[in-house]
Image (spheres, rainbow, N blue to C red):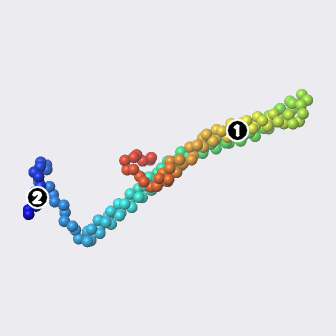
Amino acid sequence: MSEPSAAPGPAPPGGEPPAAPPPAGSLGADAQAVLDAAKAAAGSYFGGFTMLRRLFAAEVSLARDALVRALIYLLVTTVMLGTAYLLLTALVVAGLRASGAPWPLALGVPLLVSVAIAAFGIVRARKVLKHADFQATRRQLKRGFHVNPHEDTPL
């Protein structure tokens, strides 16, 4: 029996017949091809690690800005708490005592004002610190080091 011939079809550009697959190489060449494939796989794995490192660096930058802002709010809150407590205590206690109010009432009013200012500072600091939770890095760590080459990198 004869081998079936290929169906006539359009000739490839340039008028040359299609190239036949290369013959099997020597064992050394095949081993080199396997080694090259292993190197490519390792490079892909470390490429995923590089992407995770870049993501982490981007989140550290965002967290750094959020931490600076939170510390500023906490510093202002602390100064205001101290100042409010001292001034309000001095003024209100003196005024209430002059009008005949008992000591517990004279000390309780400035204390409530100071607590209100501190609560405002805590709320503002917690709002700013939401950006310091490394959400994308934690999500990527849960997924593993799988990197989609078609997605844009964060940096």
Q: Can residue 130 be seen in this view?
A: yes
Q: Where is residue 13 in the image (x, y as percent from the top left)?
A: 13, 49
Q: Based on the displayed image, in which of its 4 quarters is residue 93 positioned?
A: top right
Disc 1 element: helix
Q: How crowded is mark 1: few (under 14 residues within 10 Å), some or many (20 or more)?
A: few
Q: Where is residue 113 in the image (x, y as percent from the top left)?
A: 76, 34
Residue found at x 87% / y 36%: 104
Residue found at x 47% / y 53%: 143
Vertical side of 94 occupied by 153: above or below: below
Q: Is residue 15 visible?
A: no
Amino acid at dot 1: Ala
Amino acid at dot 2: Pro
Mark 1 and 2 residues: CB-CB less than 8 Å, in contact?
Answer: no
Horizontally, residue 108 falls left or right of residue 14, namely right
Residue found at x 11% / y 52%: 7
Vertical side of 137 occupied by 43: above or below: below
Q: How many labels does the image show?
A: 2
Which quarter of the image is occupied by the N terminus? bottom left
Horizontally, residue 41 falls left or right of residue 54, namely left
In the picture of the structure, the residue carrying the numbered disc 1 is 119
Horizontally, residue 50 falls left or right of residue 117, namely left
Q: Position of residue 60 (x, y in %)?
A: 53, 49
Q: Where is residue 103 in the image (x, y as percent from the top left)?
A: 89, 36
**Which badge, 1 or 2, comes first in the chain's sequence?**
2
- Identify which residue, 93 or 48, lies in the foreground: 48
Disc 2 element: loop
Vertical side of 76 occupied by 47: above or below: below
